[in-house]
Image (cartoon, rainbow, N blue to C red):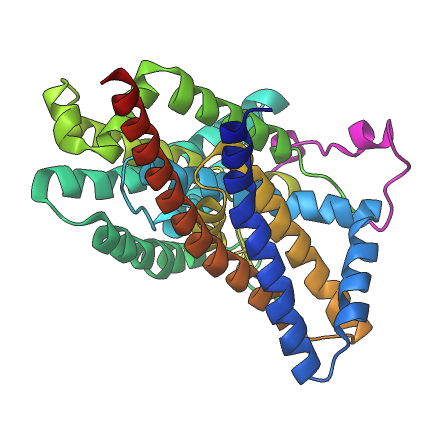
Amino acid sequence: MNAGLVRRVGLAVAAPLVAAVVAILVSSIVLQVSGSNPYETFKTMLENGTKLETLIDMLNRATPLYLSAVAAAIGFRMNLFNIGVEGQYILAAFLAAVVGAQFELWAPLHIAVIMLTAMIVGAAWSGLAGLLKVTRGVNEVISTIMLNFIAVGGLVAGLLPRFIDDPTAANQGTPQIADSGRLPDLNSWVEVFTREITKGRRLTGVLLVAIVVGIIYHVVLNRSRFGYDIRASGMNPDAARVGGVPPKRMILIAMIGGGLVAGLVGMPEVLSDTHAYDQGFVQGLGFAGIAVALLGRNTAPGMAIAALLFGFLDSSSAVLQVSNLASSEIVVIMQATILLVAVIAYEVVNRIRQRDEVKRAAHMVEATA
C-alpha cells in the first residue's frame, strides 16, 4: 500500500482515537477520585449499550442531535457561526404543534403539513439573522443569540398560555395532535431482524427523515455546483466573489438552509413522542448539535458517528444513576473531554497535513526543475 495513503488514513483516524483515549483516561481519574470503580462503570456502560432497548434509546437520542448538527454545519461550511438552532427548532416545534392540532387530514398529508410548518418557521427565523447580516452587517453570532432569547423566552413563553389545552394539568401544553398527524414508529422494521422490542421503547420514524437529510446534505455540499459555491465562499470569500459567486446571496441561502433543517429537530417529540408542545419540551439540542457538528468535522458520516456516540453516552447516564455505580455527570465530562481534545487534535492534524502538502509541492518543483 502507498505510504502516503497510509499516512493520510492514519492522520484521519488519529484525532478521534486520541480524543476517545484521553476522555476515558480523564473520566477514569474523575471516577477514581469520586470513589467509583472505573472498570465496573465502563463495563456496565458497554453491557447496557449492547441491549436492543438501549440501542433504540441511542438512535432516538441521536436523531435530533444529528439534525441539529446538520443545521449548524450548513452555516459552518460558509464560515458562518449559526448558534441560533436552539431558538429555531423550539419556535418551529411549538408553531408546528399548534398548527397540527387544528385539524385532521389524510395521514401523509397531515404529517407533511406539520413538518413543512416547522421547516418554514425555522427557515424564516434563521433567515432573519441572515438578512440582518447582509443588509446591516450584524454579526450572526450576536443576532442568533438575541433571536434565541426572543424565540424561547419571548414568543414561546408568551404564546404558550394562549394555547394550553388543560390548565389543570401538571405539565401544561398545546392540544394533542390527532392520530392522523402521528408518525408511525419503526419497531416492526427492526423486529424483522431482531426480537420483539420491550419496555415500551419505540424507534422514531423521524430517523428516516434524518437519514434523507444527511444524504441530501452530503450530495449537495460535495457533488453539486451549489455546494462548491458554498464551500468556496466559506474558504475564501474574496476569491469566490471574483469567480462570480454573490457572497450576500450565499450567506442568506446558507442561513435559510440551516433553518429549514433546524425546524425538523423537534419533530421526534411532536410527531413520535408527546404529540404536542408542553412545558417539559426537550431543550438544549441546538447547542448539543454544535458540539456534534464540530466533532464530526461538518461531514455527514462524521456527524452521524458523533451523534451516535453522544446518543450512547446520554442513554448510559440513566443506567449509571440507577445502578449507583457513578454520577450521571460523568457522561457530561466524557462528552466535553471528547469534544475539547478532538478539536485540538483536529487542528494538530490539519497543521501536519499542511506541512506535508508543502513538502510534497516542494518535491514536485524540484523534480520538474
- Tell me: residue 132, above or below residue 27: above
In this rendering, position of residue 140 left or right of residue 44: left
In this rendering, position of residue 179 left or right of residue 137: right
Whether residue 265 is visible here, answered yes or no, is: yes
From the viewer's side, name the closer residue of 55 and 17.
17
- The residue sitting at 55% across, 21% down in the picture is 109
x, y (%) of residue 255?
Answer: 29, 36
- The residue sitting at 75% across, 42% down in the picture is 202
Residue at the extreme right: 195
Magenta stretch: dominant SS?
Answer: loop
In this rendering, position of residue 45 left or right of residue 354: right
In this rendering, position of residue 130 left or right of residue 36: left
- The residue sitting at 30% across, 35% down in the picture is 358
Instruction: Classify residue 24 by image quadrant.
Output: bottom right
Whether residue 269 is visible here, answered yes or no, is: no
* Total tally of numbered discs in the picture: 0
- The magenta region covers 176-200
x, y (%) of residue 236?
Answer: 20, 33
x, y (%) of residue 243?
Answer: 14, 18
- Tell me: residue 278, above or below residue 232: below
